[in-house]
Amino acid sequence: MDALPPSFLHHHLPQSPLLQLHDNIICNIRRQYIDTRTQTNLSKLNADHKQELDVHTEHMSIVVERRRRADVLERMMKAHKSTSPVWDSESLEVIAMKWTPITIIFVVGFVLIWSSLKAL
């Protein structure tokens, strides 16, 4: 397109608003990268952005490390928790904890009533 004469471009190629918009955007970007002051500012901006990214990454690595330590501690606590071979299931443990006192009270009451009736 650069080799074509300007009169050919204006007469033979239709200019849509969308093409003009893209052309303006490309020209603005070209100007920024050609201007050395803008290049310096862009490099400073990118360097600062890299620093912020490092800070976020550092915070994220601290969070991940804390989570890993908490998981290891939780696994160690579960491993050291002694489980009786009698109470393998949680439902058996619940039944035993709930019904053992009730059964003891019932048996003691039955023995007391039986002994008082036997004494008569």
Image (tube, rainbow, N blue to C red):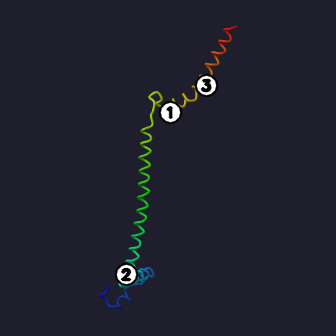
Q: Secondary structure at mark 3?
A: helix
- Do residues under tags 1 and 3 come within 8 Å of each other at their CB atoms? no
Left or right of 107, for residue 90: left
In three-dimensional space, the C-alpha distance between marks 2 and 3, rounded to whole angstroms, equals 83 Å
Say which quadrant the C terminus sits in.
top right
Where is mark 3, residue-wise? 102
The residue drawn where x is 45% and y is 33% is 83
Where is mark 1, residue-wise? 90
- The mark closer to the camera, 2 or 3, is 3
Identify the amino acid type marked 2.
Answer: Thr
Q: In front: 64, or 33?
A: 64
Identify the amino acid type marked 1.
Answer: Glu
- The local crowd at label 1, few if under 14, some if 14 to 19, many if 20 or more residues have their Cα within 10 Å, is few
- The local crowd at label 3, few if under 14, some if 14 to 19, many if 20 or more residues have their Cα within 10 Å, is few
The residue drawn where x is 41% and y is 54% is 65
- The local crowd at label 2, few if under 14, some if 14 to 19, many if 20 or more residues have their Cα within 10 Å, is few
The residue drawn where x is 37% and y is 81% is 40
Q: Secondary structure at mark 2?
A: helix
- The mark closer to the camera, 1 or 3, is 3
Q: In front: 66, or 90?
A: 66
The picture places residue 36, in percent across and down from the top left corner, at 36, 84
The picture places residue 68, in percent across and down from the top left corner, at 41, 51
In three-dimensional space, the C-alpha distance between marks 2 and 1, rounded to whole angstroms, equals 68 Å
Q: Along the polypeptide, which appears first: circle 2 or circle 3?
A: 2
Residue 7 picture quarter: bottom left
Q: In front: 99, or 113?
A: 113
Identify the amino acid type marked 3.
Answer: Ile
The picture places residue 72, in percent across and down from the top left corner, at 41, 46
Where is mark 2, residue-wise? 40
Q: Is residue 114 above or below residue 59?
A: above
Q: Along the polypeptide, which appears first: circle 2 or circle 1?
A: 2
